Amino acid sequence: MHKMIKQLSLLVFSLGLFNLAIAGQHDPRAPGVTRSGKTIFHNYCSVCHGDKGDGQSRARNGLNPPPRNYTTPESAIELTRERMIKSVTQGRPGTAMIPWVTELSGEEIAGVVDYIRSTFMHLGNQAAATTRAKPSAALLASTGGVLYMQACALCHGELGTRQTTGNMNPPPRDFGSPAVIAELNRKRMIASITNGRPNTAMRAYGERFSPAEIEAMVDFIDAAYMHPAATAAKK
Ligand code: HEC
Ligand code: HEC
């Protein structure tokens, strides 16, 4: 009962904000008119997400869950472009994030999502990931490559940059980042895969895979993600 009242008041509150957002809007949706992502963000979204996209708006205190802070590392990992477009189109049930499909065209939704991504989100890793080459067919066909794609890519990604699903804390490391390359040597990687990393999503694989298989996966990670240029040069 208490929960229902809370949800109801949240709904009334968010509808109020919604009207507020609409009232500030001077350019109603018209066929053939596509408003810029920036215009849409500041007319419709900043009331909750804040002018700087960090969720620090006046509306924030009344909202549970609070509006997304786009500037955090977690947001950069979790919020793929596809997920954002879906959330803006369909809303997030049970939250103040309503569906925008009736207010904004598909093009405008993509536009405001791209505006948020390029203006507020810290996508360093993701940008690197999109320019990073896929492992060669030969590497993918190696024992380590086959096992990695079966057992590890789920979290570490096909590009070794970490996968964007889920809410892991800490998230998987980006095997291609210079800091990670400097920190991880072969011995440590074998130990981490065999024994897992306590209090993280990285569990122990020592019972599932033989030492030779674990070494094959380490070789694959090294050749495919950590030192891809060296591997290419050797060919
Ligand atoms: C009434 C307040 C409010 C307004 C206005 C609002 N949002 Fe949100 N938004 C939220 C809240 C609250 C969440 C967090 C929902 C959650 O945690 O699932 C959220 C989450 C999001 C997310 C992340 C969703 C996900 O998949 O986790 C995106 C992207 C987003 N909003 C974009 C927008 C855009 C674009 C607009 C303007 C067209 C907008 N929001 C307007 C409250 C608002
Ligand atoms: C459920 C998600 C998940 C799966 C599946 C997974 N990992 Fe991980 N992995 C993680 C996370 C999270 C970390 C970061 C742990 C940390 O920060 O200490 C990690 C870290 C690592 C590290 C670095 C460890 C270190 O010493 O810092 C290596 C190497 C690694 N994983 C290899 C693998 C291999 C090989 C597989 C497949 C057999 C695999 N992982 C499967 C989530 C996963």
Image (tube, grey):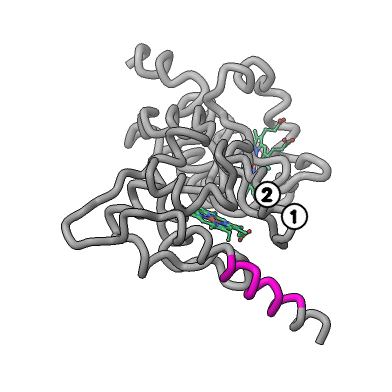
Local secondary structure at mark 2: helix
Residue at coordinates 46% horizontally, 39% vertically from top-left?
A: 145
Find residue 58 and name its label: 2
- What is the spatial separation of the Cα atoms under label 1 and label 2, in whole angstroms? 7 Å
Please say if the residues under marks 1 and 2 sit with CB atoms less than 8 Å apart: yes
- Residue neighbourhood size for the residue with mark 2, other residues' Cα within 10 Å, grouped as few (<14), some (14–19), many (≥20): few
Q: Position of residue 141 (x, y in %)?
A: 38, 41
What is the span of residues highlighted in magenta in the rendered image?
A: 6-16
User: What is the secondary structure assignment of the residue under circle 1?
Assistant: helix
x and y, in percent, of residue 3 in the image: 78, 79
**Which residue corresponds to the image point at 63% horizontal and 18% vertical from the top-left?**
179
In the rendered structure, which amino acid carries the disc numbered 1? Answer: Asn
Q: Is residue 87 shown in magenta? A: no
The picture places residue 148, in percent across and down from the top left corner, at: 52, 43
Closer to the camera in the image, 194 or 113: 113
Where residue 28 appears, x then y in whole percent? 31, 60
Which image quarter has ligand 1? bottom right
Circle 1 crowding by C-alpha within 10 Å: few under 14, some 14–19, many from 20: few
Q: Which mark is residue 61?
A: 1
Please identify the quarter of the rendering in which residue 1 is found: bottom right
